[in-house]
C-alpha cells in the first residue's frame, strides 16, 4: 500500500457526487489531473471550516471540483465566487455546479477574474488561486486588493511537479510564471506564507492586519 492510499483510507470519504465529477473530469477533459481530487478537496473544505469565510474568491474553476469542496465547508450565509477564463469549459462545468447540493452557495462566471472580480465590490475573506500560471503574480495582486486584512490566499501548483527545482527542465511560460510568483511572494512583507508539499504544492498566505 502506498502512503497516498493509506492517507485516503484514513480521512473523510470523498462524497459520491464529487467522486462522479472527478471520474467524469478525467474521462471527458484534457488534463483531468488538474482537478483537486479527494485529499486536496477534503483539505480545502477543512480550511473553509477553520477560517469560516463569508465570501470566497476562486480563480480557475476548471471542472468545479475545488469550488464544490470549498462550498461544502461554508456556513449557511457564505458564498463562493468562481471564475474560469476558458469559455470552452462552461458546457461541462456549469451543469455539475448547478446540479450540485451546494449550488446555491456558488456563483460561476466565465471571464477574466483579474478584471471582473474587483467589479463585484466585495471584500473577500479567503481566495483560492488555481488559474493561468503565467499570470499568477497579477492574479495575486488583484486578490490582495480585494482581500480583507487577516484574510487567506491558497495558491495551487506552486511546486509544479518539482520543476521549480529542476535546472534541466525547459522553462516554459507556465513554469516561469510559477517561479516568478513564488519568488515574489517569498519577498512580500505584506503577507505571511508557507508552502505545503501536498500534491503539486499549496502555498498558504495570510494578509497581515
Image (tube, grey):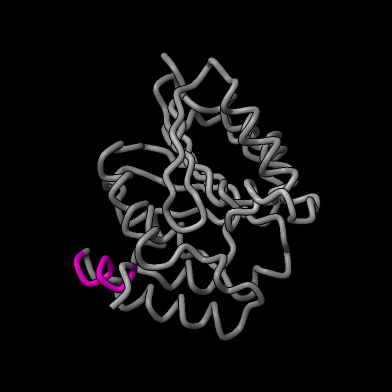
Q: Is residue 151 magenta?
A: no
User: Residue 87: x, y in percent?
Assistant: 73, 64
| Residue sticking out furthest to the bottom | 27
User: Which residue: 31% across, 78% down?
Assistant: 16
Could you say which is closer to the camera, residue 37 or residue 21? 37
Q: For the C terminus, which image quadrant?
A: top left
Q: Quadrant of residue 11?
A: bottom left
Could you say which is closer to the camera, residue 136 or residue 93? 136
User: Which residue: 56% across, 49% down?
Assistant: 159
| Residue sticking out furthest to the front | 168
Is most of the magenta stretch helix, strand or loop? Answer: helix
First to last magenta residue range:
4-10
User: Residue 188: x, y in percent?
Assistant: 58, 20
The answer to whether residue 122 is above or below residue 104 is: above
User: Residue 202: x, y in percent?
Assistant: 47, 46
Could you say which is closer to the camera, residue 51 or residue 110? 51
Amino acid at each position: 500500500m502506498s502512503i497516498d492510499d493509506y492517507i485516503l483510507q484514513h480521512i473523510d470519504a470523498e462524497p459520491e457526487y464529487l467522486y462522479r465529477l472527478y471520474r467524469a473530469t478525467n474521462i471527458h477533459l484534457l488534463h483531468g489531473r488538474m482537478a483537486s481530487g479527494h485529499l486536496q478537496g477534503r483539505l480545502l473544505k477543512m480550511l473553509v471550516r477553520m477560517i469560516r469565510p463569508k465570501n470566497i474568491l476562486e480563480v480557475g474553476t476548471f471542472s468545479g471540483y475545488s469550488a464544490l469542496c470549498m462550498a461544502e465547508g461554508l456556513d449557511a450565509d457564505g458564498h463562493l465566487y468562481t471564475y474560469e477564463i476558458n469559455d470552452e469549459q462552461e458546457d461541462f462545468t456549469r451543469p455539475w455546479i448547478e446540479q450540485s447540493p451546494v449550488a446555491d452557495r456558488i456563483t460561476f462566471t466565465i471571464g477574466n477574474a483579474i478584471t471582473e472580480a474587483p467589479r463585484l465590490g466585495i471584500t473577500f475573506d479567503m481566495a483560492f488561486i488555481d488559474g493561468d500560471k503565467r499570470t499568477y503574480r497579477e492574479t495575486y495582486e488583484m486578490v490582495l486588493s480585494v482581500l480583507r486584512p487577516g484574510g487567506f490566499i491558497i495558491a495551487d501548483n506552486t511546486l509544479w511537479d518539482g520543476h521549480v527545482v529542476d535546472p534541466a527542465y525547459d522553462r516554459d511560460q507556465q513554469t516561469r510564471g510559477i517561479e516568478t510568483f513564488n519568488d515574489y511572494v517569498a519577498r512580500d512583507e505584506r503577507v505571511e506564507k508557507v508552502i505545503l508539499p501536498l500534491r503539486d504544492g499549496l502555498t498558504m498566505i495570510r494578509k497581515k492586519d
